[in-house]
């Protein structure tokens, strides 16, 4: 009897895991990929858009595949689609555990996002360097202007004192 209760609890937990994958993982990864696709046109404003574009596309693809491998291929269950698209059916057809593909997707996501962040970091540093140089130029021009005004005021003051 206790064994039946344990199996029932285990079944509820597995059902909750599967429901979370269908209701959260699959739509969440699809929405993330869609949001990244919407940001692709904004990548053209970056100094090295081809690198950023490539990494964004790798990230989008990784999220799409991860959504499929994690959100649609789930543990075995009695209800559809888990009764057809499950770990057992996948390994029987492909011969490789689904976790291998999930790991590959997660690693490619991590790599691509890290590269994207390094591109943004480089852009930020470059922008700060430009702003610093621009500020130094402004300070030099303002200093020169003030020195000229100071010189003119001294000359006028010297003329006033001499008369």
Image (tube, helix red, strand yellow):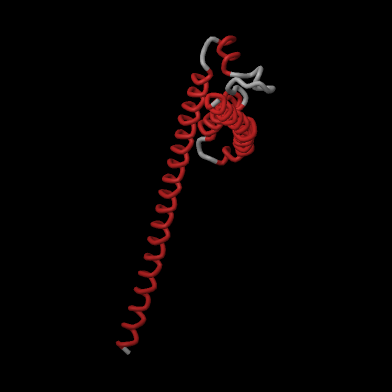
Give the quadrant of residue 152. bottom left
Residue 2, percent across and down? 53, 27
Closer to us: 98 or 162 = 98
Task: Please indicate whether residue 88 sits to the left or right of residue 131 in the image.
Answer: right
Q: Is residue 40 visible?
A: no
Along the line of sight, the residue nearer the viewer: 98 or 1: 1
Q: Is residue 125 above or below residue 7?
A: below
**x and y percent of residue 151 in the render?**
34, 73
Q: Which image quadrant is residue 159 in?
A: bottom left
Depth check: give the residue in front, 155 or 74.
74
Query: In the image, residue 32 lies at what x, y percent?
Result: 60, 36
Instruction: Name, please, the residue furthest toward the bottom.
Output: 163
Tell me where residue 1 appears, x and y as whole percent.
55, 25
Q: Residue at 53% across / 9% down in the picture?
A: 95
Q: Quadrant of the C terminus?
A: bottom left
Q: Residue furthest front?
A: 1
Q: Residue at x 57, y 14 (%)?
A: 88
Q: How many marks?
A: 0
What residue is shown at x 35% (from left), y 74% (from top)?
150
Q: Is residue 55 visible?
A: yes
Asked if 90 appears above or below 42 in the picture, the reply is: above
Residue 7 vertical placement versus 122 (above, below) = above
- Image position of 33 with respect to 149: above or below: above
Asked which quadrant contains residue 13, the reply is top right
């Amino acid at each position: 009897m206790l064994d039946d209760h344990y199996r029932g609890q285990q079944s509820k937990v597995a059902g909750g895991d599967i429901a979370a994958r269908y209701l959260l993982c699959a739509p969440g990864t699809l929405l993330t990929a869609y949001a990244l696709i919407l940001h692709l046109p904004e990548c053209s404003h970056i100094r090295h858009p081809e690198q950023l574009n490539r990494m964004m596309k790798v990230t989008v693809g990784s999220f799409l595949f991860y959504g499929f491998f994690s959100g649609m291929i789930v543990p075995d269950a009695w209800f559809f689609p888990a009764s057809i698209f499950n770990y057992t059916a996948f390994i029987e057809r492909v011969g490789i555990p689904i976790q291998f593909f999930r790991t590959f997707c997660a690693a490619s996501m991590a790599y691509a996002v890290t590269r994207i962040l390094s591109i943004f970091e480089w852009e930020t540093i470059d922008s700060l360097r430009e702003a610093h140089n621009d500020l130094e130029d402004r300070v030099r021009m303002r200093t020169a202007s003030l020195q000229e005004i100071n010189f003119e005021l001294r000359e006028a003051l010297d003329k006033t004192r001499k008369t």
